[in-house]
Structures are given as C-alpha cells and as structure tokens.
Image (cartoon, helix red, strand yellow):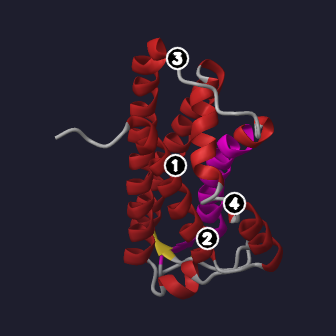
C-alpha cells in the first residue's frame, strides 16, 4: 500500500476488488461443476413434499444474490467517486497483482473497504446456501446447475485467459454480472413467475 504524504492518497491494489469478483464467480461455477459431475443422468424429479423447503432455500439464495449485485454496484461507485481516473486506475487496469495504482483519499478507501466487507458477507452466504441445497436437495442443485451450464459455459475459460494475459478488470466485472444474472435466472426458473 502506498501513502503519499500531504495529498493523503492511499493506494489499494485494484486486483483486490477483482479477486472478490472472481471469488463470487467461482462460488456460482461450483454449482455448475456439481451438476456436470452427475450429468448426463436425468434431473431428479422434485419430491412434492420438498417443494416448500426448496422454495425457502431459493428465496434466501435469491435475496443474497440481489444483495451482492447491489453491493458491487455501490463498490464500483465508491471507486468512480473517489479515483481521479477510475477507467485507467481500475476498470482498464490489468488483471495482475500489485502493478497498478488506485489512488483514493482516506474516506474513499473507507467507503471501498465497507462495500468490500459487505460483498464478502454476501459471497459467503451464497456459498452457504448453494452448499446447503447441494447436500439437502440434490435434485434442486442439479436443476440449478443445469439452468446455468449453457450461459456460463465460457466464463471460467475467459477468466483463466484473463489472468494469464492481464486483461482489463472490467471484463471480470462483466463476467460477474453475467454470472449473477444466470444464477438469478436459474432461481426464477425454479420458483416460477410472480403471481398476480
């Protein structure tokens, strides 16, 4: 971390935020991997008496996915409000550890740290609910993975390539949005459309 005396700018590594996004993506891709480990077995049929329990689990998972999406929006805004050039210092920074500067004032770093902490909590909660579903409702876990397998089929390869080539962080953030949208779509497919 670099601190400039007088200007009071602090330099957190922009890779830290990118790694948080990759962590969230990895958690969701774990659900796809769980599905692929048993595919092409047919999806287990949902047991009617499990429906209320599955809906409860999906509702909790959905809330955490929505919260994580909102927190990442606030995290991005914290960077945009506080960096002199958020494109050069963050979005277009290469996916590398410790090679670029993200110069923030102390209050901007505090805002970033707050959103980072909130995102970490939501990622842990999503991991917990996906794991709970996999262990208590393998039929539901299978179907969630099945819903996400096609839309997320290229994400891991893109991120791995990005890590090897140092592509801009903005691409990881785009993959995070796509991953959360795929998980939200899988949840919606299982819960069903809202009733009027």
Q: Which residue does the numbered mark 1 point to in the structure image?
A: 183
Dot 2 lies on which element?
helix
Q: Which of marks 2 and 3 is nearer the N terminus?
A: 2
Label drawn at residue 47: 3
Per the model, the C-alpha gap separating discs 3 and 4 is 29 Å
Q: What span is colored magenta in the figure?
A: 8-34
Residue pictured at 53% horizontal, 38% vertical: 126
What secondary structure is the magenta-colored segment mainly? helix
Q: Which residue lies furthest to the top in this view?
A: 49
The reply to whether residue 97 is in sight is: no
The reply to whether residue 44 is in sight is: yes
179, 110: nearer the viewer: 179
Relative horizontal placement of residue 158, taking residue 81 as reference (left or right): right
Per the model, the C-alpha gap separating discs 2 and 1 is 26 Å
Say which quadrant the N terminus sits in: bottom right
Dot 4 lies on which element?
loop
Per the model, the C-alpha gap separating discs 2 and 3 is 46 Å
Residue pictured at 45% horizontal, 46% vertical: 65
Q: Do the residues labelled 1 and 4 touch (CB within 8 Å)?
A: no
Q: Which label lies toward us, 1 or 3? A: 3
Dot 1 lies on which element?
helix
Local crowd size for mark 1, using a 10 Å CA cut-off: few (<14), some (14–19), many (≥20): many
Q: Do the residues labelled 2 and 1 touch (CB within 8 Å)?
A: no
């Amino acid at each position: 971390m670099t601190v400039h005396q007088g200007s009071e700018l602090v330099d957190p590594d922009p890779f830290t935020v990118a790694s948080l996004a990759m962590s969230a993506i990895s958690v969701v891709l774990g659900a796809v991997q769980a599905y692929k480990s048993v595919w092409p077995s047919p999806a287990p049929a949902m047991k009617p008496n499990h429906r209320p329990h599955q809906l409860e689990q999906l509702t909790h998972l959905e809330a955490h996915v929505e919260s994580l999406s909102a927190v990442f929006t606030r995290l991005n805004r914290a960077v945009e409000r506080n960096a002199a050039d958020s494109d050069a210092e963050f979005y277009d920074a290469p996916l590398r550890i410790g090679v670029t500067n993200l110069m923030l004032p102390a209050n901007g770093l505090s805002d970033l740290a707050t959103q980072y902490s909130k995102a970490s909590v939501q990622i842990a909660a999503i991991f917990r609910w996906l794991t709970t579903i996999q262990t208590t409702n393998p039929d539901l876990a299978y179907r969630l993975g099945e819903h996400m397998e096609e839309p997320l089929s290229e994400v891991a390869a893109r991120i791995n390539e990005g890590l090897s080539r140092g592509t801009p962080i903005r691409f990881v953030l785009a993959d995070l949005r796509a991953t959360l949208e795929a998980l939200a779509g899988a949840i919606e497919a299982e819960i069903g459309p809202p009733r009027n």
